[in-house]
Amino acid sequence: MAEAAEEFHFSPRPNRATEIHWHGWSKDAFDEARTTGKPILLSISAVWCHWCHVMDETTYSHPSVIDLINREYVPVRVDNDVRPDINQRYNMGGWPTTAFLTASGDILTGATYLPPDQMAGALVRIADYYRESQAEIASRVLDARKKAASGVARSAGALNAGLVDATLEAVKSAYDPEYGGFGVAPKFPHTDAILLLLEQSAIRSDPELGRMAVHTLEQMAGGGMYDHVEGGFFRYSTTQDWSVPHFEKMLEDHAGLVQALALAGMTDSLEKTIGYLDRVLRDQKTGLYAGSQDADEHYYSMDAEERKSADAPYVDRRIYTSWNAALAVSFGEKSERLLDALFKHAYRKGEGMLHSEGVGGQLGDQVWSMLAAARAHQHGFGDRWLPVALDLAEHIENKYGDPELGGYFDHSGVEELGRLGERIKPLAENSVAAMALIELDTLVGDPSAPYRGRARRALESVAALPQQYGLMAAVFARALDRMPHAIKVTTKNPQLAAAARAAHPYAVIDPSGDDRAVVCVGTICLAPVTTPTAVAEAIREAATSSA
């Protein structure tokens, strides 16, 4: 895969970072490192990243740093959003990432932001070490590769309902009763934890869980995490009380927040947030949504009148499939136009989804699109959507699946430069895959179909991770809890379908029926009903029988 953009994105403010002889992530860069005997300097940045811009303006603009890099290194620059697979393997704890690599792509050492004096010293020391210590480096690389090779097997484990309980307890333990959210500072939205609370509140008839979620959303929407002039959530807060945010706005975050606001019934905040997305991030020609809007502390300190005459922060207009598909899932029955545009842009039958323009698809793009296509079928958008979802299921199994241990790798293995040859099964993407496969199994209704088995193997392949991840495993718990609790409601009546979704967070709608609703759990179906109240009652009866 090649970089999507022909040119690198640097800080919008004056800088000299362009004087560094940057390469894209490519075979040519690695070949040059091997031929010249130089180490690789890998910079992982992001369009929206404040400290990436600062590093461009300071460190990468310092004359001695520029000279040292151009003389002693093969510099490679990667955008995190364009290449999440590279970021997954090389991130040093944040952005910018500054990683020093061997010519084969193995890690020597690394850091995040380095000011000019520290960077200059590191450049000299590491270049000298690389020239003089090849035997020691080879031994370290071999040990690291042996450890990485066992990672896939170590992530696997057995499934049991206790994993849902344990993750929910981790979320509750981290909950901040005063300010909402989880933990202290810095404070991130953790949208899957919010969604887990909302879903479990309904499943367990526990209103306290819902109250935690709503309090968190209200505190974020009412405080500094929200742009009260133009709308939209900032990425995270540097303070426990949500008062001082990091000012970038990410489509990825908004996908989960829109779903949480909708599930929590916070209509006013939901409409304002979608209004921001439609005004600022949505491309009016294609109907697709841009990846992010840049951080600009000065701009966001202005009132509405002052902003009218100021230049708005830069918007990264690249289209990322996974984030648009996740947003479509959150939009629900209002997602038809977005899905039509997205699949026209990124989908090829039998070949899956692209990640972004010129960049091949990754697991996140495939699984979110599979879930979005399954939901499109459930919303009655047309007969083509279920075959699309099933086609993506086969593509994922064939190109990303682990035939030995089950589950899915984060990329298809087409490119293996550097550490991309290491196979990683990400918790989040395998969990989303399981959600989609459970819904497909419910829709198809054929006991011989492979989808439920694939869902189980996807979750088993990462089942050892939740114990380490704590509340970060909320997406896994959400997927695992669907295994025994998915309920099928067959109806083409939009009002009855809406009642089913309101009554149960795991309701799967089969639109092939008539104006009545038939509620089924497994092979057991209740008598048809004709009113929203009766649908809710039938779902409660079915859920009780299932439990």
Image (tube, helix red, strand yellow):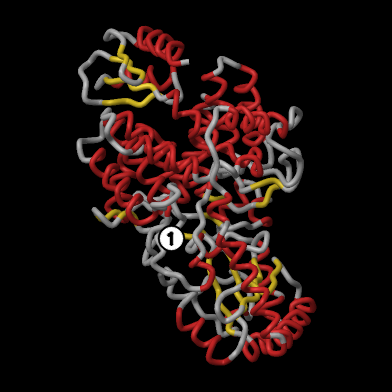
Q: Which amino acid does label 1 sit on?
A: Arg
Is 453 on the left-hand or right-hand side of 394?
right
Q: Residues within 10 Å of mark 1 (few under 14, many from 20)?
A: some
Q: Which residue is tagged 1? A: 318
Residue 521 placed where, x, y %? Answer: 36, 18
- For image coordinates 32% across by 41% down, the residue present is 373
Which quadrant of the view contains residue 358? bottom left
Residue 338 placed where, x, y %? Answer: 34, 44
Q: Can residue 228 be seen in this view?
A: no
Which quadrant of the view contains residue 383? top left
- For image coordinates 64% across by 52% down, the residue present is 247
277, 523: nearer the viewer = 523
Q: Count all numbered tags in the image, as a single digit.
A: 1
Q: What element carries label 1?
A: loop
Residue 276 placed where, x, y %? Answer: 50, 43
442, 52: nearer the viewer = 442
Above or below for 495 versus 3: above
Quadrant where the image shows the N terminus? bottom left
372, 408: nearer the viewer = 408
Is 412 on the left-hand or right-hand side of 336?
right
Q: Can residue 335 be seen in this view?
A: yes
Is 193 on the left-hand or right-hand side of 238?
left
Residue 459 placed where, x, y %? Answer: 48, 40
- For image coordinates 68% across by 71% down, the residue present is 55
- For image coordinates 28% across by 15% down, the residue present is 517
145, 284: nearer the viewer = 145
Above or below for 62 versus 85: below
